[in-house]
Amino acid sequence: MKKSTQKTLMAVIIIFVFGGSILSFAALSFFDTPQTNQQQITSNIVNGPIDQSYQSTYVQNGFTWIKFYYTTADQNFISFMESLPSTLTTVNGQPQIILEKINSTYTNETNYIIISNRLGDESFADLSEEKVMESLCRLLTVTPLECGLINITLPTDQNTTSQ
């Protein structure tokens, strides 16, 4: 085969490969339906379970996710949990907590809490305000002022003796 024929044949093969890849990309893009992976949450308190992929998306974006499983929790404690997203905000007042309330009478679970964010996860069954605040103060990305006030203790003078 002549050299000019080889060059022409090679050019046709290269054009065919590039053209085929462009056509296949266009066809796949046309028939492929985009999947939306992020559900817009309109409130920082969600009633009922949410898909794990949505939780992962919000946690990756800096939110702290609280799953609150309850059956017979004290109404005052439920009110405390519902107040957390609006109370423990960032310095600019932006929310950083999403509370997912799950009535566990349907899932045969007991009362417990799972707190998740980029810094880690904690789960516990001790439904006390102190335990929740202690865990949130450890895990929140932007620590609110309330966390600093929890750890303040008055100094005691141990060297004084009563006379």
Image: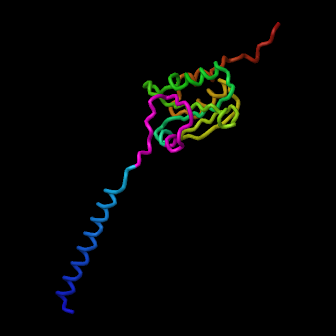
Residue found farthest to the top:
163
Q: Is residue 100 magenta?
A: no
Residue found farthest to the bottom:
1
Which residue is at the front of the view, 27 or 139? Answer: 27
Q: Is residue 36 magenta?
A: yes
Image quarter (top left, top right, bottom left or bottom right) of the N terminus: bottom left
Q: What colour scheme does the image use?
A: rainbow
Q: Quadrant of residue 5?
A: bottom left
Q: Is residue 158 left or right of residue 96?
A: right
Residue found farthest to the left:
4
Q: Which residues are magenta?
A: 35-56
Position of residue 10 measured from the top left corner of the image (x, y, whole percent): 24, 81
Position of residue 9 measured from the top left corner of the image (x, y, whole percent): 22, 83
Which residue is at the front of the view, 6 or 89? Answer: 6
Image quarter (top left, top right, bottom left or bottom right) of the C terminus: top right
Q: Main secondary structure of the magenta part?
A: loop
Is residue 108 shown above or below 144? Answer: below
Q: Is residue 112 left or right of residue 41?
A: right
Position of residue 133 measured from the top left corner of the image (x, y, whole percent): 62, 26
